[in-house]
Image: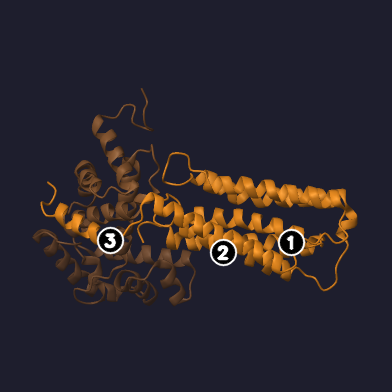
Chain colours: A brown, B orange
Amino acid sequence: MRTRAGTSEAGPSRLREDEAMDRYAAGEAAAFAELYDLLAPRLWSFLCRRVRDPDRAADLLQDTMLRIHRGRSAFVTGSAVAPWAFAIATRVLLNDARRSRRRPLAIGGDLDVLCGPGPDPGPEQLVASREMARHLSSDAARLSPGLRAMFRLVRGRGFTIAQAARRLGISVGAAKVRLHRASALLRETLPFGLRKVGR
Amino acid sequence: MSLPPDLRSRLLAEVARTASPTRAQRRARSLGLTGAAVAFMLLAFVAVGGPHPGARPEPFLSGISLGWLLVAAGAGAGVLYRGRTMLGPSRRRLVLTILVAPLLLVAWTVLWNRLYPEALQPWPGRLGWRCFGLTLLLAAAPLLALVLTRRASVVRHPGWLGAAGGIALTAAAGLLVVLYCPIANPAHTALGHFGPFLILGLTGAALGRRWLDVGR
C-alpha cells in the first residue's frame, strides 16, 4: 500500500526519516537528532565519494544538515525527505566546488595556482604540485603576451573567463580560445608524469 | 570512512543556536508578506486613479481584461504549484511559463485590437512610459514577497523560478494596467504593457539566483 509519496518500495527507515522530518517541520526539536541518525550516514557516503576528503565532507555534511534545519518549514507533509536532502547536498557540493575553483591558491608566484593540490593534499600530490609550479613558472615566459595575460588572470588570479575577457578587451569566445591554447601549450611542456595533475 | 564522532554533537549545538521557523510560523509569515504585497499593489492602483475605461468599448475592455486575468492565473499556477515535491517546478514548466505567457498576451491583445480597431487611435505624447513605470511599481512588492516567502526552501532552478515569477506578476500587474490605461495603439502597448516583462523577468531571475539558491 502506498502511504506516503515515494515510499511504496522504501524500507521502514525511509518512512521513519520522512516522519521525523515532518515532526521537525512542525516544531518538535528533538526530531532533528533522529533525522540526523537516519540521514547523515547516507549523505556522508554520498559526499565522501565525491570529495574524497573526510574533513571537507564533514564540513559539507554539516552545511547540508544546517540548511535542512533552516529550510524545515518548507517541508511538505507527505513528501519524501531524502530527495530533498540529497538535492541540498548536491547544491552545497556544487557551490563549494565553484568557490574552490575561484579561490586562488597562492603558493609562490602567479602560476602556482595550477599546482594547488586541493585541501589536505597527500605528500605525492604536494611534490607533484611543486614540481609543476617550477616547470610552469619558467615555461609561461615563453607564451605570447596575449596568452600569458589570459592564463595569469584566470589561473593565477582567479578571474572568471568573462571577467578576464572584459579586462583584456576581447570577446568571451576569444578568451576561451586563448586560455585553451595557453593551457595546452603549458601542458605539453610538462614532464609526462605531471600532465594529469595539470588538467 | 566513518562519520566523525564529534560531528553529531557539534551539529546539534549549532542547530540549537540557529533560529529556524517552524511550518506554522512560516505559513503565518508568508500570509502576512503576501497580504501586504497584494494590499500595496491594490492601494497603489487606487492611488493612481483605479480603473479608467476611457473611450474603449465595454466588450473590448472585458475581453482583453479576461485574457490578462486567465494568463496571469495560469502563469501563477505554473510558478506556485509544486505538488508534493519541495524542489520547486521543473525547468520545462518554468521555461514554458516564461515563453508562453507573454506570447499569449501579445496574441490576445492583437486579436482584440483587430476586432475593435477604433481602440487603436494614437495618443500623442503617451509613449507608454507611464504604464511601464506603473507596471513595475505594481509588480515590485509581490515579486519581492514571492522571493522572500520561498527563501530557504530549496528549489532546483532558482533563476528560472525567479524569472517565471517575474513574468507571472507582470501579467497580474498588467491586468490592472489594462484597466487603468485607455490606450491600445501598438507602439504604446509594446513599450508600456509588454516592456516590463523583460525587466521584471530579468529582475526575478537575478533575485532568484541571489536569494533562492541554497548554496549561496
What amino acid is at disc 3?
Answer: Thr
For label 1, the SS is helix
Task: Specify few, some or many for label 2: CA neighbours under 10 Å numbering under 14, 14-19, or 20 or more.
Answer: some
Question: What SS does tag 3 mark?
Answer: loop
Q: Which quadrant would the C terminus of chain A be assigned to in this image?
A: bottom left
Q: Residue furthest right?
A: B118
Question: Height in image: A99 above or below B62?
Answer: below
Residue at coordinates 51% horizontally, 60% vertically from top-left?
Answer: B33
* Residue A71 screen position, x and y as percent: 35, 53
Instruction: List the residue tagged with mark 2.
Output: B141
- Residue shown at the point (70%, 55%) measured from the top left: B175
What residue appears at the point 73 percent right and 47 percent down from the top-left corner?
Answer: B67
Amino acid type of the residue tagged 1 in the rendering? Ala
Which residue carries the number 1 mark?
A: B190
Mark 3 Cα within 10 Å, few/some/many (few <14, many 20+)?
few
Return the x and y of residue A64 as percentages of the image width and height: 28, 53
- The span from disc 2 to disc 3 (Cα, nearest Å) is 28 Å
Name which residue type carries label 2: Ala
The image position of residue A121, as x and y in percent, is: 14, 61
* A37, A113: nearer the viewer: A37
Depth check, mark 3 against mark 1: the one in front is: 3
Residue A78 visible, this orientation: yes
Residue B186, by quadrant, is: bottom right
Identify the mark nearer the N-term, 2 or 3: 3
Q: Give the mark nearest the N terminus, 3 or 1.
A: 3
Mark 3 belongs to which subunit?
Answer: B
Instruction: Specify the quadrant that holds the N terminus of chain A.
Output: top left
